[in-house]
Image (cartoon, helix red, strand yellow):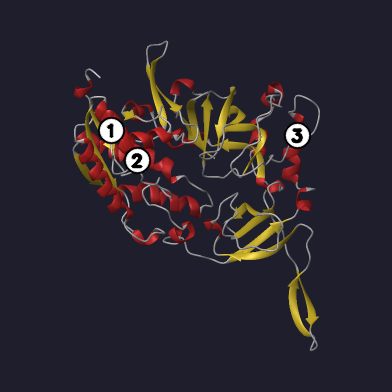
Amino acid sequence: MAGNQNIKVCIGLSGGVDSSVAALLLKQQGYDVFALFMQNWHDASTTLHGDCEWEEDRFVAEMVARKIGIPFYFVDLSKEYRQRVVDYMFDEYEKGRTPNPDVLCNREIKFDAFLKCAEKLGADYVATGHYCRKETIVTEDGKTVHRILAGTDPNKDQSYFLCQLSQEQLAKAMFPIGDIIKPEVRRLAHEADLPSADKKDSQGICFVGKVDLPTFLQQKLKPCEGDIVEVYDPYYTDNEQYTFIRRTLSSLMSEAGEAKMITDYVSEDKVTPVSAAGCPFSMDAVAGLSDEDFLRLSEPVRYDIRFETETYRSGRKHIKKTRYKENPFGKIVGKHDGAQFYTIGQRKGLNVGGHKDSIFVIETDIPNNIIYVGEGHTHKGLSRSCLRVAPDEIHWIRQDLAMTPGEMRRYRVRIRYRQPLQDATVIMRENGLYILFDTPQRGITPGQFAVWYDGDEMVGSGVI
């Protein structure tokens, strides 16, 4: 492409196939390209493989750069990564929240600390192997605005991980493979005989690798044994918060009837098709709710089940023993090593047997070190319809589209990576931004990022 040779692009080369093909395409398009490999983690003892994965990645990345014919540089950003990503993770888990380190890595490292290193080496832009697209437009008032669009490959769209980027960061960003599907990326890598062509996609925490999360967190968070309490259905019958949510949602319905309170479930990798009927709620009724109503509607049900003990005599010798009295609301079904190591919606690692269906975490009570669980995908505690993003956690990628208090819009939303987009109404109020989903969502998790889209464009995000 004419003129590209005057544009210097730094490709963040990780040793994986995606960034390798991104580098290849930039070189083919005539850009002045150089590769920069960043090391962000030293401690191999925390990874499941137990070896220094980054050393192998660097070796492959260097071979790729040599094959393509571009300069290769190395930078150690492990200090910045620990301070700005890992320490944040520890802090969030300690509070009982579940952060997304990949989102933080992009905001704090790749498009901040790494970008600054690249600029010192003369880069005009930083490119990565993310499956997403960038488009630059000029608004009616003459301002240049950068848009983030979902990747062309629906199975690999990674726009979610870039949900915290600013316009200043996007101005310097390039995503060369955003309009290519993964099989084509592999084909291009094989065609160019790149050393990373058959390399498996990385898993686990960004730049740390695949880890056993509780073990990783125990570097700073101390294990502390506590109870696992199973919550039974009768708990919700007279629960004030559950009754309030059901009553309020039902009052918002366009047609008279009870609001849906439980998520439809098909399987882990499928989602119930969106209803052709559209939004079940009346926009006038939604607008009529007060800020306090929304605040309460967004709050999850809290659990406080007390267990009383009784003494009884057991065996031929009538030895006196103590046991918990039966409780219609729940039962202590096991022990855990620390509530901070678990997250809403989790089902692995609980070691609770004797159930027909899977057991899921429905709440973590950090102050009292209790995990509350429920049996089955249709357990009432697993589904919620409304979430809140605090005012200081709202991030508009498109500042020109920022909402003002009292405004409501229809967007499509996801609350975790790879979740199919969900139809929702986004409501801005003085005390925060509220997302009211058309259908209940499983496992809404504090600390995760909710991201809202207008068609293919990612417009904004916020911490739940």
In percent of width and height, residue 358 lies at 66, 54
Q: Earlier in the sequence, mark 1 or mark 3?
A: 1
Do callouts 1 and 2 mark residues in contact (Cβ within 8 Å)? no
Furthest residue toward bottom: 317
Q: Amino acid at mark 1?
A: Leu
Say which residue label 3 marks.
259
Q: Residue at x 78, y 62 (%)?
A: 327
Do callouts 2 and 3 mark residues in contact (Cβ within 8 Å)? no
Tell me if mark 3 has few (under 14), some (14-19) or many (20+) residues whose alpha carbon lies within 10 angstroms of its own: many
Q: Earlier in the sequence, mark 1 or mark 2?
A: 2
| Callout 3: SS | loop
Q: Amino acid at mark 3?
A: Ala
In percent of width and height, residue 313 lies at 80, 81
Q: Which mark is residue 17?
A: 2
Say which residue label 1 marks.
24
Tell me if mark 1 has few (under 14), some (14-19) or many (20+) residues whose alpha carbon lies within 10 angstroms of its own: many
Nearer to the camera, 161 or 298:
161
Nearer to the camera, 201 or 120:
201
In percent of width and height, residue 5 lies at 20, 23
Q: Amino acid at mark 2?
A: Val
Q: Is residue 231 left or right of residue 114?
A: right
Residue 323, quarter of picture: bottom right
| Callout 1: SS | helix
Q: CA distance from mark 1 to mark 2?
A: 10 Å
Q: Residue at x 31, y 56 (%)?
A: 42
Q: CA distance from mark 1 to mark 3?
A: 53 Å
Residue 172, quarter of picture: top left
Q: Is residue 259 left or right of residue 225?
A: right
- Pick the quarter of the image with the N terminus: top left
